[in-house]
Image (spheres, rainbow, N blue to C red):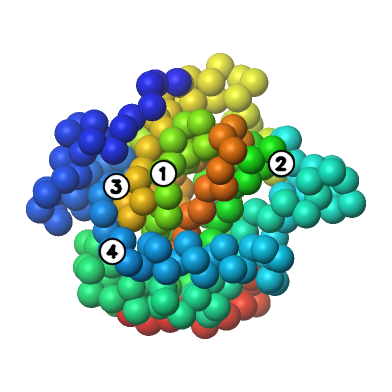
Amino acid sequence: MKQPCSRNSLARHHGHLQAPRSEQAAAFERDGYLVVPGLCPETLCGRLVEDAQAALSPVLGPAEFEADLGYPGAPPDRGANGGDTPRRLLYAYARFSALRSWLTGAEVKGYLQALLGSDSVALSQCHHNCIMTKYPNYSSTTLWHQDVRYWSFQRPELVSLWLALGEERAENGALQVIPGSHRKAFPAELLDDALFLRTDVPEGRALVDQAITVELNRGDALFFHCRTFHAARKNQTDRVKLSAVFTYHDQDNRPVPGTKSAQYASIAL
Ligand SMILES: O=C(O)CCC(=O)C(=O)O
């Protein structure tokens, strides 16, 4: 895999800092991700961290636990050591009111309109919509996947917004992405039964060799396409990593009725 790519080197390589919106959209179309440094004001980040911490000790539901997912390194069940390690505080749009106006406000909306190529954007309440936690000791490894694998929309064209609420580095499990992977077609043999990328075959290894680690600072946003392959390692530091993650789509790109993607109405921006 390539060396971790710092926020500033990403900006230098891809023109993410102060680039006109059209250039950012072109970079996103090419790479399947875009980093926008400092998109969230510090005061809001501080408030969100406080709200998230208050909801984590004790864990206020609805939440998902590492043991629920069973990813590599996760505790085997909820009764095991570390079985109560949270992974996500769910339904974040509904429960963290401080976030709402930012998530649907003009600045975020402007990015999504450019990246989705649409004036009519909506936030899905059914996917991500969480505060993602990554705890020391009992966090797990997330294998290479495309988020859209279990999502059901008319078109596989959604964009997620990952907001760093603290530093995200390789050692605390920052997201890794494979640039340009959202534009490729992958034969079924390259995916395992759970639709994770197989890294035990040369084609899979070759893809992962192109991956970069997206290092973020508090307040930085990472936009990534729902077909961009991504992964993350365990948190090997002694501090919890917190990120807020949401998914958007063109209002014309509707969820398929009766599926999990259609469970709650999307919020029009
Ligand atoms: O932080 C991680 O482990 C990655 C999470 C992720 O990729 C996902 O939930 O889709």
> Where is residue 258 drawn, in percent x and y?
65, 77
> Where is residue 25 drawn, in percent x and y?
21, 52
Q: Which mark is residue 41?
A: 4
Name the residue tied to disc 1: 167
First in sequence: mark 4 vs mark 3: 3
Q: Quadrant of the C terminus?
A: bottom left
First in sequence: mark 2 vs mark 4: 4
| SS of the residue under disc 1 | loop
138 is higher (above) or lower (below) than 189 = below
**Marks 1/3: CA–CA distance:** 14 Å
The label nearer to you, 2 versus 3, is 2
| SS of the residue under disc 4 | loop
Q: Which mark is residue 122?
A: none
Q: Is mark 2 within 8 Å of ligand 1?
A: no
**Marks 1/2: CA–CA distance:** 19 Å
Name the residue tied to disc 2: 138
Decide which of 214, 122 is in the foreground and name it: 214
| SS of the residue under disc 3 | strand
57 is higher (above) or lower (below) than 100 = above
Q: Is residue 52 left or right of residue 4?
A: right
User: Which amino acid is tagged 1?
Assistant: Glu
